[in-house]
Structures are given as C-alpha cells and as structure tokens.
Image (tube, rainbow, N blue to C red):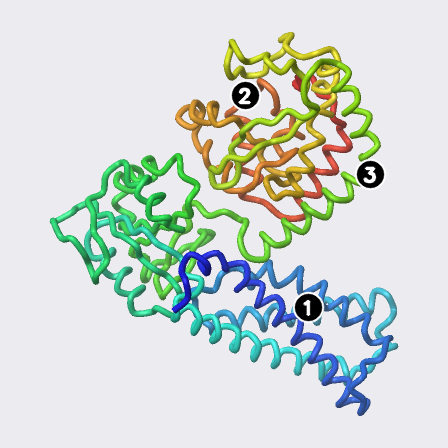
Amino acid sequence: MFRRGFLRDHSSVSLGLYVVVDLTMICIGAYLAYAWRFGNLGLDTHYRGPVFVAILLTWSVFPSLDLYDSWRGRSPVDQIRMVTLGWIAVMLGLILIGFALKQSDNYSRLWVLAWALSGWALLVLGRIVAYTLLRELRARGWNHRRILMVGSGPLVEEALARVKDAPSTGWEVIAVAMLDHDGRRDIHNVRVVEYKARTERLARRFDADEVWLCLPLDQQPLIDRVLWDFRHSTITMRLVPNLHGMRLIQHPVTDILGVPMLNLSVSPMHGLSRLMKAIEDRTLALIILTLISPLLLVLAIGVKMSSPGPIFFRQKRMGWNGRNFTILKFRSMPVDVESKTGAVWAKAGEKRSTRFGGFLRRTSLDELPQFINVLRGDMSIVGPRPERPVFVDQFKDEIPGYMQKHMVKAGITGWAQVNGWRGSTDLTKRIEHDLYYIEHWSIWFDLKIIFLTILKGFVHKHAY
C-alpha cells in the first residue's frame, strides 16, 4: 500500500504520463512507417520536420479535446474516440501545412498514410496501457482524490455506492454531510455528520480535494444555501443532480463513474494546462529578469539611497487556493510608515512614499521584483492581483465571487489591470474581469495580456 500523503499530489504526474505516451507513440509510428516504406529504421533528417510539426499540432489539438484533463472515472471508450478525432485533426493539419508551403511533393504519400494508421494504432494502444496502469496504481492507493459529499436522500447513497464499487478510479469519500441527517453515523463505512454552515471548515480539516453536492435540481434553495456556505472556499465543487435522461446543451457537464455532474467551481489550472502555465511563467520570468537586471541594480541603488532600510519590501499576500505567500517589491515607503496606522488601502493623494518611492509606484517599477516570486512559483506573470489577507477578509463578504479569483495564481499583471481596473477603482468591476480571465484562460489570452501591458505601458493614473 502506498503512503497517502506522498502520493496524493501526483495528478499532474499521471496526466503527464499521457503526454509522454502520446508523443512517444507518434514518433515510433513515424519510424515504423519509414521502415516499412524504405526498409530503413533510421528516419531521414528531411522526414523529421513533419514529425516535429505533428508534435506541435498535438500539443495544440489534444488539450482542446480535454485529452490532458483528468480521465479518472470516465469511460475509456470516450478517450479512444477523442484520441481518434484528435489524431485525424493533427494529420489533416499537417497535410494542409504541407500544401500551403508547397512541400507535400517532397514526402512519400505511402509513408504519410502508413504513419497515419500506425500512429493511430499506437496512440490507442498507449492510451489503453496508460489508463490500465493508472487504474491499477489507484486501486493500490496511489493518486487518490478525497471527496466530501454534501446532500440528502438517495442521491448521496447512489453516488457513494458508485465510488465504493470503483476503487480503481482513485476517488475516496472521506465524509458525508447530510442535510436531512437521520442519526446514522455511517453509510457504507463512511462517516456521516449533520450538515452545518461550518461544514466548509470540515472540508479543510479533512483536507478534501473536492466537494460533491448531491441534490436534485428542483432543490434550488438548498443548493444556494450550500454554495453560500462555501463562498469563501476555493475548493473544486461539483453538483451531482439526477440528470439521467435529460439533454443539456452548453453546460459544463462531466461524466464521472457514469454519473453526470455539473462543474460549479473548478480551477482551469490542472493537467497539461497547469504544466503549460508553469513553463510559460518560468521561461518568461527568467528571460525578463536577465534582460532587466541592469535596471534592477540601478533601482536597488536608488531605493537604498532614498531612505534608510532594506531594498525590498516584503508583505504577506493571499494567492492560489487561499494560501499566503510573501510578495516582493522595491521599498517605496519609510520602514515604519504603518507602525501607527496599520494596514492602509493605497489611494490617490497619499504622501506616505519617499520621493524616489513615489516615482517607482507611479511607473509600477516597484513591482519588478515580483518576477522573482514567479520563478519561485508563488505567482504567475498573468493573473488576478494578490491582496493582503486583512483586506481579503473585508472584501470576501462584500463582493460576490471575490474568493474565486484565488482559483489561479496571482499575477503581476492581469485582464483587470490592462482594462484600467487597478488602484482604488471599482472592486466589483475588477473581480468581474478577474473571473472572466479565469473562465476563458488560455496561453494565447496570457500572451495578449502581456502584449497589452507592454503596449499601454506601466504608467497609469491609478498607479500610486
């Protein structure tokens, strides 16, 4: 039996396995097709170009088909179907690129056909092997996801029974909070408690990964009650209604263990998306820090000469999943400026900054050390701006959806900032833009925001 604490954090590893398997099978398929066509296993240099393009297309097409999202508890037949559609799209894209660049006559059509067939067969085989391996490992206790179920009646018992009957999916129900508690202490040997408003604390205490809300759609008041109780949480929440036989269009429905679930609150940062975001952040942060290092040195000297104290200003901020981290800035104020006033919300016209610090804040140059936070993994380059915990406690009850912005890493710049919602502007509008970013996240959206940040510059009337 594997140790739970060590192996619960391997979701990205298991999904990364699919990435490695897919790319490996594509390459093997190309080599086998070349050996069949030309009688030589050594792929000619000229033929390696299409293989490289196919890999890039796979990285673009497969994620859009959710092939690098979690397939835990989902049908392997659906996975094979999506792999087939994805591979057809990759090959069609490769052929179109060949025609557009007038390179199609330089490659054997028999090789392309053989590669298309062998690549598909190997992709399907690789997926089946990886899926089977992960099921076996999860049945032995690897990579479990801990579930807190909330609900009433037979829906809870049905969902719980399905989880119990499928240990290979790695779902583990740690407790059930019943809205109509009848005094039972357990169901299927799982602890049962009475649902109370503080159940959100129970989820944290049991270190739950997800909350499954098992209620019929006609119980809207109860659904609203639970969502309100969890409004301060960033945990993944799914609704398990009785949807059998219903046709839903344009709803975020996930089929898990044969049960349709509505995704109520799910972070986009999982699987390949999380890996791609991490690569984007660290690569760009390293390049940017290298390029601006002379500027950082000049600014550091300016801070040191402007007033006594350290160069960097360190402050606790709330980030991903509501966890605090220490943000870095160039110090723009005297070291004891908040010793009497306590935490103060920055506003126009204040005179707490040093002369050089005021320049740093007006030009946003005081934010540049946060690229170090990005390298450390505390922040992203693009994301909602992080706030101090004391202000989070104030805003989370005043602004709808405020805590949901913590479902992704905090950013140096963001969609709200490039649209002018920064400083002491309307917080509701800022959160609306942050949530829009989370709902529509993509690498291209990040690059667009970075481009707009550079285009519009760092000086802004609300930067102070």
Q: Tell me what residue is drawn at x 50 percent, y 59 percent.
A: 11
Q: Which mark is residue 330?
A: none
- Please state which of residues 284 and 83 is positioned toward the viewer in this rendering: 284
Say which element carries label 1: helix
- Please state which of residues 409 and 225 is positioned toward the viewer in this rendering: 409
How many numbered marks, from 0 up?
Answer: 3
| Mark 2, residue position | 426
State the image coordinates of residue 199 (x, y, percent, origin top left). Answer: 28, 41
* Disc 3 to disc 2, C-alpha distance: 34 Å
* First of labels 3, 2 by sequence position: 3
State the image coordinates of residue 437 (x, y, percent, origin top left). Answer: 58, 39
State the image coordinates of residue 141 (x, y, percent, origin top left). Answer: 39, 66
| Mark 1, residue position | 90
In the displayed structure, would residue 154 be above or below residue 257? above
* Disc 2 to disc 1, C-alpha distance: 45 Å
Badge 1 amino acid: Val
Say which element carries label 2: loop
Front position among marks 3 and 2:
3
Front position among marks 3 and 1:
3
The quadrant of the picture occupied by the C terminus is: top right
| Mark 3, residue position | 291
Q: Tell me what residue is drawn at x 50 percent, y 14 percent.
A: 342
